Image (spheres, rainbow, N blue to C red):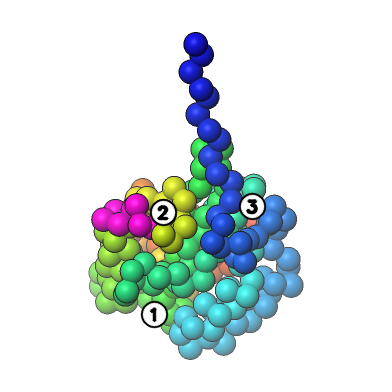
Amino acid sequence: MKSAEPSAPKRTLDKWTACFVGRDREPSAAAVDEFDRVLSDAADERPLQTFLASHPVLLAPLLPPGGAFWCLDRPRFGAEWIPDFLLASVTSVGFLWVLIELESPNRNALTKGGLPALKLAEAQRQVRDWRTWLTDNVAYARGQLGLTDIEGTCRAYIVIGRRGGLDPKHAKTFRALSTDHTTVMSYDRLRDAMRGSEVPYG
């Protein structure tokens, strides 16, 4: 008797249908220009959080190319852990998840001496806390919260500061902040990614 084929992965997130972004994932030039204007005027991360929540397609470059995705605005992990965004894209084997933490564009990632600044250290600690919670509560996250296939090892992005605030002599140190599962980037790099270009760092 032939064994049954494994069922195909679920291709929808039933509890998050309002956050769905279709296959048309190319950000418009007008939306990117408006993001640039909001970025230029922002005193902290809050107006950027609000703008990106209204234009989730701008976050598409943080996911693998192609396919639909979901953008969850400030979802709760338990009572206290709240990422700025949680993205999910459809893959051939299930869902791929991405955590996003936004910090102020006016706070540098490194001190003048080239050490991680306090705000960056806090953001890194938050990402570790999220991953710990997901690892310890993975069944609850997948079942009760509807975060199908999520894992504590999912990729994370920390967006902080502007490229102009990075001393070129600390470029190597800045690149070393990014690990296999966490990428630290400036808002300028995020904006460049929205426009379809990429830079080595910053």
The answer to which of marks 3 and 1 sits earlier in the sequence is 3
Place of residue 131 in the rendered image (x, y in percent of width and height, measured from the top left): 31, 58
Q: Nearer the viewer, residue 98 or 93?
A: 93
Q: Which residue is mark 3?
A: 68
Q: Which element carries disc 3, helix, strand or loop?
A: loop
Q: Nearer the viewer, residue 60 or 32?
A: 60
Residue 107 image-quadrant placement: bottom left
Q: Residues within 10 Å of mark 3 (few under 14, many from 20)?
A: some
Disc number placed over residue 107 in the picture, else none: 1
Give, as a single range, the part of the protein colored magenta: 135-141
- Residue at screen point 54% across, 84% down: 47
- Residue at screen point 27% across, 77% down: 118
User: Can you see residue 143?
Assistant: yes
**Dominant secondary structure of the residues highlighted in magenta in the image:** helix
Badge count: 3
Q: Which element carries disc 1, helix, strand or loop?
A: loop
| Circles 3, 1 touching at the beta carbon (< 8 Å) | no
Place of residue 56 in the rendered image (x, y in percent of width and height, measured from the top left): 61, 67
Magenta span contains residue 138: yes
Q: Which residue is mark 2?
A: 142
Left or right: residue 22 versus residue 2 is right
Q: Mark 3 is on which residue type? A: Ala
